[in-house]
Amino acid sequence: DAGVTQSPTHLIKTRGQQVTLRCSPKSGHDTVSWYQQALGQGPQFIFQYYEEEERQRGNFPDRFSGHQFPNYSSELNVNALLLGDSALYLCASNWGGSTDTQYFGPGTRLTVL
Amino acid sequence: DAKTTQPPSMDCAEGRAANLPCNHSTISGNEYVYWYRQIHSQGPQYIIHGLKNNETNEMASLIITEDRKSSTLILPHATLRDTAVYYCIVRAPYKAAGNKLTFGGGTRVLVKP
């Protein structure tokens, strides 16, 4: 039973660039949430996708956008990268768009120079 | 979601039980208590959750006080691999509340030989 997978593992970008991170949910899951975790802090909720729509959003600017595909996989896009966007980006999945338990992937480490 | 308070750090001896406290004095009657842990630079790992009754699984036990204002996560026989940051999270059950998990600072647990 495959768990949540994310790609790439690590990524280095420069300020002003754009980045796309990818997530495949755990088998049987159809809901994907994204979190940002800065060094030394707990994860912060970015947004959630269910039925290919953004259902809930945290306090993040419009530079952060996402997409969910018919196979339930998801992408997180960040435009106009800032140094402060350097973080571990985590994807979590669960079933049914409900409050079913979320399971996290290993994360993508983004470094902005 | 209700706010949680956890001690910032604690040590425990390998092979002994580790008792991790969490205060959630403003919890509502329909909110669940979730525990996750995060081993260095990995994605958070789900441990256990509960509403009112005590819960046990292969990883840990969760003891919730009768007034639900606090809880304790018990790792029955701590091993070096249990060294991690442990997060206690309170979460509403309703679908309308969405999937947002609000992480606090967590407790940094160091298991010593």
Image (cartoon, rainbow, N blue to C red):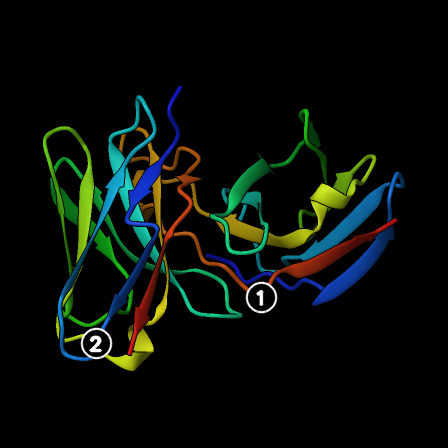
Q: Residue B104, relative to residue B81: is it above or below?
A: below
Q: Where is residue A107 in the image (x, y as percent from the top left)?
A: 38, 50
Task: Name which residue type carries label 2.
Answer: Thr
Q: Residue B106, relative to residue B35: is it above or below?
A: below
Q: Position of residue B61 (x, y in %)?
A: 73, 34
For marks 1 and 2, give the one nearer the viewer. 2
Q: Residue A73, relative to residue B109: is it above or below?
A: above
* Residue B50 visible to the viewer: no
Left or right of B8 in this view: A14: left
* Residue B33 visible to the viewer: yes
- SS at badge 1: loop
Task: Name which residue type carries label 1.
Answer: Gly
Residues flagged by tags 1 and 2 on a common chain: no
**Viewer-proximal residue, B95 or A113?**
A113
Residue occupied by mark 1: B105
Left or right of B96 in this view: B49: right
**Viewer-proximal residue, B27 or A45?**
A45
Q: Which mark is residue B21?
A: none
- Residue drawn at point x = 76 percent, y = 56 percent: B110
Q: How many labels does the image show?
A: 2
Q: Which chain carries label 2?
A: A
Displayed quadrant of residue B77: top right
Label 1, label 2: how far apart the Cα atoms are: 29 Å
Left or right of A64 in this view: B104: right
Residue occupied by mark 2: A14
